[in-house]
């Protein structure tokens, strides 16, 4: 779980506008018409993971007989593997010791292949957030002037392994993706820099870098052509990627998403669409978001997509970010525990698993807005833009076990929902918050809240830096 606020970067100097959301069966590919350098290249990208515990490929290049391949991927144990196969033998290979399991963070990963170097240990490199990785479970240095497959006139793919295989598709977000052929470029002062105030690694404008033969730069800003090569080379071809897969969740403005690592004592829904779509097949499941808040005013939406027999959903919040006081016997829904509040589809509210009359019923196709005012300790709900309970807020829960850190808590039982923290998966959203961030079905600042106007904000790091 990631709780951001004081260490967020409000002004980065260089803002990344868009990322692309990869899910199962989505990838990009191209086959260059001719070869570039096989001894020297750099690949840098920003990635925010969604799915853990599965093999997921970031980049690969393969000859038709598969005896010559270059692979970069997250292994099923969440380590990173970077290796090149030449005639079925590993000629260069790195496997990290550390695991990459933070689904709320953006990682900048830079991979360098430079076999022209006279220093064996410098011929294959991995950098993470501007720092060179030095601890490896496996490190096989290539011989001087060894040729990789990447750089040749071979099929190159982003987001899956050669030839496919559903378990090997990338699940997550990717931004600022650069492949330079013929250059060994360390990330410092080229792809990013350390923020002078916070020390956080942040991206820099890469548009002036040299692409080299077959190099490319993907900024994902053209929703009609997500594989557009900004360097002006041949675009990558998108497969199973649409305009709705473009996101404003980026390495300079990180939005909340569902957190599969905090999911109600193992009662997790099935996640997809960058952890913004939840499906529950049998019982109440939930997943708290990757960001919790202790101050400010925040807004999210839940779209009721589908309902199975006996199914239901609950919108709400909780003041718990561990399992210490959760009811482990089955109340894995908002309002089913001591420090939660839920708005159920039959119109009732739930406090500590006790139901009482509250608002309108809702069903498939409806959108529930959740307004969390931590500053004034109030909670509001809306159905399709209409505030419930005449705009009178519910008091946020408090007890001796209160932490003061609140999380939205979408809960789903034999149903499907799509959650929107400002980076939606569904269409028709065009309302930003008062800072201009996020994209919602309904304006988060429209309404009378306990007789007053209030501005509520999308849950992202730019807003947290200002209001969190």
Image: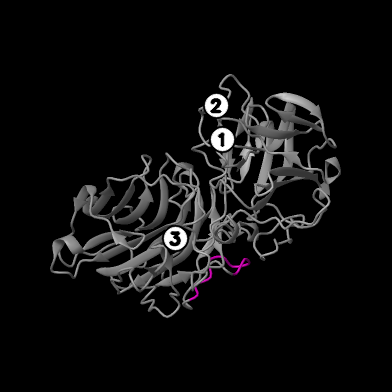
Work out whether mark 1 precedes mark 2 in sequence or the reverse, and give the earlier one. 1
Distance between the Cα atoms at labels 1 and 3? 30 Å
Viewer-side residue, 432 vs 223: 432
Label 3, on which residue?
A: 46
Picture quadrant of residue 143: bottom left
Instruction: In the rendered structure, find residue 320 and report the number of the disc placed on it.
Output: 1
Q: Residue at x 80, y 27 (%)?
A: 356
- The figure's colour scheme reads one colour
Instruction: In the rendered structure, find residue 340 and report the number of the disc placed on it.
Output: none
Distance between the Cα atoms at labels 1 and 2? 8 Å
Work out whether 224 lies above or below 285. below
Instruction: Check contact, mark 1 vs mark 2: CB within 8 A.
Output: yes
Q: Residues within 10 Å of mark 2 (few under 14, many from 20)?
A: few
- Element marked by disc 1: loop
Q: Which residues are magenta?
A: 222-230
Q: Residues within 10 Å of mark 3 (few under 14, many from 20)?
A: many
**Residue 2 pos. (x, y %):** 48, 47
Label 2, on which residue?
A: 325
**Residue 324 pos. (x, y %):** 50, 27
- Element marked by disc 2: loop
Left or right: residue 1 compared with residue 148? right
Magenta-colored stretch includes residue 150: no
């Amino acid at each position: 779980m990631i709780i951001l606020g004081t260490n967020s970067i409000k002004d980065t100097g260089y803002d990344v506008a868009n990322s692309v959301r990869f899910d199962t069966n989505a990838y990009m590919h191209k086959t260059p018409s001719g070869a570039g350098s096989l001894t020297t290249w750099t690949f840098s990208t920003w990635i925010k993971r969604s799915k853990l515990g599965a093999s997921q490929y970031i980049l690969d290049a393969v000859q038709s007989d598969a005896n010559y391949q270059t692979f970069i991927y997250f292994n099923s144990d969440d380590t990173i593997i970077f290796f090149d196969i030449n005639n079925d033998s590993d000629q260069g290979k790195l496997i990290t010791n550390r695991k990459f399991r933070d689904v709320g963070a953006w990682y900048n990963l830079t991979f360098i292949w430079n076999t022209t170097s006279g220093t064996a240990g410098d011929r294959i490199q991995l950098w993470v957030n501007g720092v060179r990785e030095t601890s490896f479970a496996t490190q096989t240095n290539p011989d001087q002037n060894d040729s990789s497959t990447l750089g040749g006139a071979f099929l190159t793919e982003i987001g899956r392994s050669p030839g496919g295989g559903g378990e090997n598709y990338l699940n997550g977000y990717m931004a600022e993706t650069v492949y330079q052929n013929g250059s060994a470029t360390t990330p410092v002062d080229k792809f990013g820099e350390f923020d002078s105030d916070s020390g956080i690694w942040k991206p820099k404008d890469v548009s002036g870098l040299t692409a080299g033969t077959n190099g490319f730069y993907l900024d994902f800003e053209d929703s009609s052509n997500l594989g557009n090569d900004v360097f002006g080379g041949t675009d990558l071809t998108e497969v199973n990627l649409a305009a709705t897969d473009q996101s404003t969740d980026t390495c300079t403005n990180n939005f909340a998403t569902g957190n599969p690592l905090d999911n109600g004592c193992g009662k997790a829904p099935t996640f997809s669409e960058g952890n913004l779509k939840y499906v529950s097949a049998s019982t109440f499941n939930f997943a708290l978001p990757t960001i919790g808040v202790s101050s400010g005013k925040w807004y999210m939406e839940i779209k009721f997509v589908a309902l199975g027999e006996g199914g239901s959903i609950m919108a709400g919040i909780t003041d718990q970010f561990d399992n210490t006081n959760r009811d482990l016997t089955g109340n894995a829904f908002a309002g089913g525990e001591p420090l939660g509040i839920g708005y159920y589809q039959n119109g009732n509210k739930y406090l500590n698993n006790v139901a009482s009359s509250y608002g309108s019923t809702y069903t498939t196709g409806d959108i529930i807005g959740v307004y969390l005012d931590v500053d004034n300790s109030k909670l509001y709900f809306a159905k399709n833009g209409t505030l419930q309970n005449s705009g009178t807020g519910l008091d946020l829960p408090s007890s001796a076990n209160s932490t003061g850190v609140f999380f939205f808590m979408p809960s789903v039982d034999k149903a499907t929902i799509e959650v929107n923290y400002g980076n939606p998966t569904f269409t028709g959203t065009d309302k930003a918050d008062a800072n201009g961030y996020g994209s919602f079905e309904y304006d988060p600042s429209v309404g009378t809240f306990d007789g007053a106007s209030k501005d509520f904000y999308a849950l992202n790091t730019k807003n947290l830096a200002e209001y969190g």
